[in-house]
Amino acid sequence: MSEPAIALTGLGRAYGERWALRDLTLELGVGQTLVVFGPNGAGKSTLLRVLATLARPQAGEARVLGKLVPKQGWAVRAKLGFLAHDPLLYRDLTARENLTYHARLYGVKAQRIDELLEAVEMTKRADEPVRTLSRGMVQRMAVCRTVLHSPELLLLDEPVANLDPAATALVSSLVGPTSGTTRVVTSHDPVGGLEQADIALGLRDGRPVLLAPASEVSAADIGALYS
Amino acid sequence: MNAVRALLRKDLLLELRAKESVPAMALFSLTTFVIFHFALDRNTVAGSLASGVLWVTLLFAAILGINRLFVAEREQGGFDAFMLAPVDRTAMLIAKACALFIFLTIVELIAVPAFAFLLLEGSILPALPGLIAVLVLANIGIAVIGTLSSAIAVQTRARDLIAPLVALPLLVPLLIASARATQPLLLSGGALSVPTKWIAVLGLYDLVFALLSYAVFDFLLEE
């Protein structure tokens, strides 16, 4: 049996004295999608930051693509694509300049930038400063940044936030279920979230209160997390 | 080196677009020279006084740039984006130090002629070769210490206060060496040669702090 893409054992992370995430144990296979549900402050973003090697776990262990993070983070960073709440783009640079900067950091050819801009229909606005773009357009650019280096594992924090249905369809081939990559996605949409999930995780106050194959979870179960 | 080039190019582009550091640093220097011109109540200065006025002004102007060095990284997610990339983290130290060095050089291209015009009696041209050597060595030291201090300060809430509080004490030896090295170049009777002792001190200071920064910078970027 192949090694899981993600293996968490008793994972915990605190900010000061408050545990943002605790006692999380799960495995996610290669090519599968884990959708994380939970109200604001439940620990969803913290989980993604730990997996992205940006936050150090204070309890338990996290293995991402077979490597212990963040200790062996250098070995997996090139294979991770992290779409955070913050687009991680410089507002005074144009969309193309931002992507060129990231392409150079990852050793990606410039041709890939044009392909992605085309895919999200941003070619015409690519030479305008990011601060002049709408939130939806910035989100599309952030998606381009996330998949620029063709990562094996996508960590997506509400990837379709700020996107209209047409834009959602555009980015779907890059970060959606059809992208073919292993994904960890946070969502507040019970129906849409469960549709794309192989495994559903529900967090509340940093604790896992629901962890099951998505086929065994109903939208009502997810709704109960928010009540 | 590709990462250093990418970071440096990005920093220079950001400064070109936002114009947040260099214009402020240059304007501060010019204003301070004008203030000295009137506050000292004399038309010209020379020797140790001239050297002190020049270096104190350049040092405080540098603090403005140091304060802004990591602001875009902090406020626009640049740190996270960089930490996600599969590159050596010291690339950021080298790129930021190079960017600050370039900012300081541009400021000095404006400030030094203004200093000569407002506060020196004779021409600065005879002193120029020696002065350029001192400026380059001092800029390297300020760039390295400035990058280190700024990386520490940007993690705190009161970064505008912390950066000078960390940087200035560390820059005192550099200020002494730069002022002593510049003093004979600005004598009223004409420029003498630069004392090699102080040039050596500057070179040693640069080397020690470059190695120290290289050793600790990784830890500063850690969460």
Image (tube, helix red, strand yellow):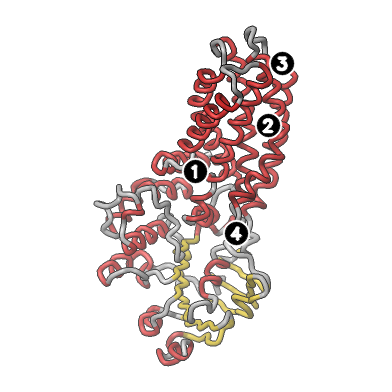
* Percent of width and height locating residue A19: 63, 76
Chain identity of mark 1? B
Chain identity of mark 2? B
Whether labels 2 and 3 share one chain: yes
Disc number for residue A73: 4
Closer to the eye: label 1 or 2: 2
Q: Which residue, as the protein is rendered here, is positioned at the far top?
A: B189
Above or below, A179 relative to B166: below
Left or right of residue A76, residue B152 in this image: right
Left or right of residue B216, residue A75 in this image: left
Whether labels 1 and 4 share one chain: no
The kind of secondary structure element at disc 1 is helix
Closer to the eye: label 4 or 3: 3
The quarter of the picture where the N terminus of chain A appears is bottom right
Q: Which residue is mark 3?
A: B195
Q: Which residue is mark 2?
A: B206
Tell me which numbered mark, 2 or 3, is placed earlier along the sequence.
Answer: 3
Cα–Cα gap, marks 3 and 1: 37 Å
* Percent of width and height locating residue A131: 35, 54
Callout 4: few (<14), some (14-19), or many (20+) C-alpha neighbours within 10 Å? Answer: many
Closer to the eye: label 2 or 4: 2
Q: Which sits in the foreground, B163 or B137?
A: B163
Q: Which residue is mark 1?
A: B7
Residue kind at label 3, given as amino acid type: Pro
Tell me which numbered mark, 3 or 1, is placed earlier along the sequence.
Answer: 1
The kind of secondary structure element at disc 2 is helix
